[in-house]
Amino acid sequence: MLKIENVSVRYGRAVQALHDVSFDVADGEVVAVLGSNGAGKSTLLRAISATLALHRGTVTSGSVTLDGTRLDTLDPAAIVRRRLMQVPEGRQVFGRMTVEENLRVGGLAAEPKRRAAAKARVHELFPVLADRSAQPAGLLSGGEQQMLAIGRALMCDPVVLLLDEPSLGLAPQLIQRIGRIVTEINAGGTAVVLVEQNASMALQVSHRAVVLEVGRLALAGSSAELAASEDVQRLYLGGHADDAHETDAPARPRRILSAWKG
Amino acid sequence: MSTFVQVLLNGTGRGAIYALLALGFVVIYKSTEVINFAHGSLALFGGYIVFALKPTLGWLGAAVCGVLAAAALAVLIERVLLARAKLASQDSLAILTIGVDILILTEITRRLGTASAPFLGDPYQDVRLRFLGATIEGPELFALLTAIVLIGGFFVAFRFSTWGLTMRAQSENKEAAALMGIRSWRVTASAWALGGALAAIAILFIATLPVAGGAGLTAAHTIAFAAFPAAILGGLTSPGGAVVGGLVVGLAESSASQYIDNDFAKVAVYLVMLVVLVARPSGLFGKVEQVRV
Ligand SMILES: Nc1ncnc2c1ncn2[C@@H]1O[C@H](COP(=O)(O)OP(=O)(O)OP(=O)(O)O)[C@@H](O)[C@H]1O
Ligand SMILES: [Mg+2]
């Protein structure tokens, strides 16, 4: 349903951030996007949500389609109205607004009669958001802000949810919880594109995965396949499947992916 | 005592006018981060339309048209000049608005000529209210009442309505707002329209004898300029600060003209601004930029 075909992206004149990237996300699927810092993961999500212009970037070739509709010619608002939502890198909740207001903003593009149900679902997934509803979002903890960022995007009842490094900066138990939440959201029928540096969590909760390396698609396959593959083991999981936490990965300074066993 | 009450009344009346101007200015700044140096011209343009249409439409009809025209001109400036220069920095856009200001001011001054000093304020020109031995003139009284209603309405809308929600979301984080499906051009256009409309409403009270003195509409542009210190006093990004800043400017002006002299009053406003900025560089209500890394 979501189809990314030969997408190339450039920032300004000099930086070519993506080269010819293609992959699909089927209905109700979780696809992990792995890659080290600067590989182009966020750029890929920006290309899908059409927010590249806000970063002075442009899609120079290729196309993004959702159920046959070209998204790359639409503006971000039109894409949201097709119920494709992105939770951007670094949460980006509206810190000066209350938790409740953040959720209201998330539901602005939804059909009015669906908002109550969406909110009930968000509160069910994240009870803490119901408890903190009158509190300014800026005062929430990092983990709570991430939940709010996800909850805000769910207010639109998305068919596709793009998550940009939801585990960044969170404690191991919370990372595990985010993983479970992704599974839970997916169980409701939402397809998820999960950008992660935490490869082990991402490979656990996803059906398929793609690996970006300096702007190019380096690997693609089922998550089980990738989790077992030598390359991914060595580069992203920090060792071998059985003793990942004991074996040091070969020193490769460019890769700084974290490994986590959950 | 009655002199003091008079100073307070004059200051509050004028302050209400500045508050309307400064509020519009701040709303525009919040939505686009552009310092709109053409704000005085927006006001003047609205006033000119009222002046031109009054003979045919009567005061009320002309006033409505003037306010709408100023709102439309503000949106036009934003859409045609600012939105197209997307890659320009906020500073160069501010300089662009200086150009727009000069253009509009020159053209309207040319059209008005030097022969007459037109006034706009018919319906309340002869209204006067006596209060503790002091007098509040019609324009100032009506400015105060209008400002209370409009500013109150603004704050309710800003806090609770969907429009206010989108305004606040966009001014806080453009990218996140876009990702929530907020159409940024609509928010921006509505902010400019509101700024233009408030400026034109303010001029209905400025271009009157008690406020502008003998110069009427011709003096309006200069008087409207006091919206800048008002907005800056309030911290540029705070609507509440703009209102307080407006009142401070109005009171500074009226007390300086009462206790020192009229010429000093014009300077006093800027002196107060300097003093405040030295003590609190981000204004009375300005938020110190906090960057989380
Ligand atoms: N606004 C920008 N202007 C110029 N270059 C940019 C911009 N944003 C990103 N880049 C460059 O594009 C490349 C891809 O960046 P991107 O943010 O997509 O990486 P990422 O995979 O999300 O990294 P991270 O894991 O650190 O978030 C990097 O080389 C980066 O320096
Ligand atoms: Mg990134």
Image (cartoon, helix red, strand yellow):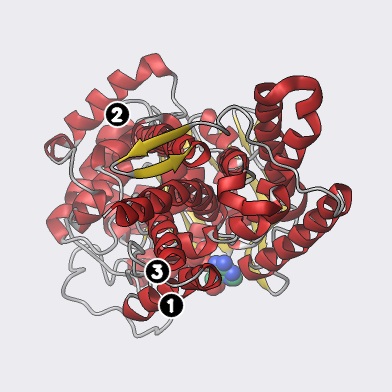
Label of residue A187 in the image: 2
Q: Nearer the viewer, mark 2 or mark 1?
A: 1
The residue under the point 51% across, 44% down is B178
Mark 3 CB lies closer than 8 A to ligand 1: no
Q: Residues within 10 Å of mark 2 (few under 14, many from 20)?
A: few
**Chain to which mark 1 belongs:** B
Whole-percent x, y for residue A172 in the image:
15, 60
In the rendered structure, which amino acid carries the disc numbered 2?
A: Ala
The residue under the point 73% across, 34% down is B50
Label of residue B259 in the image: 3
Mark 1 CB lies closer than 8 A to ligand 1: no
Q: Are marks 2 and 1 in contact (CB under 8 Å)?
A: no
Describe the element under mark 3 as helix, strand or loop. Answer: helix
- Quadrant hosting residue B277: bottom left
In the rendered structure, which amino acid carries the disc numbered 3?
A: Tyr
Whole-percent x, y for residue B68 in the image:
67, 31
Whole-percent x, y for residue A68 in the image:
65, 28
Q: CA distance from mark 1 to mark 3?
A: 20 Å
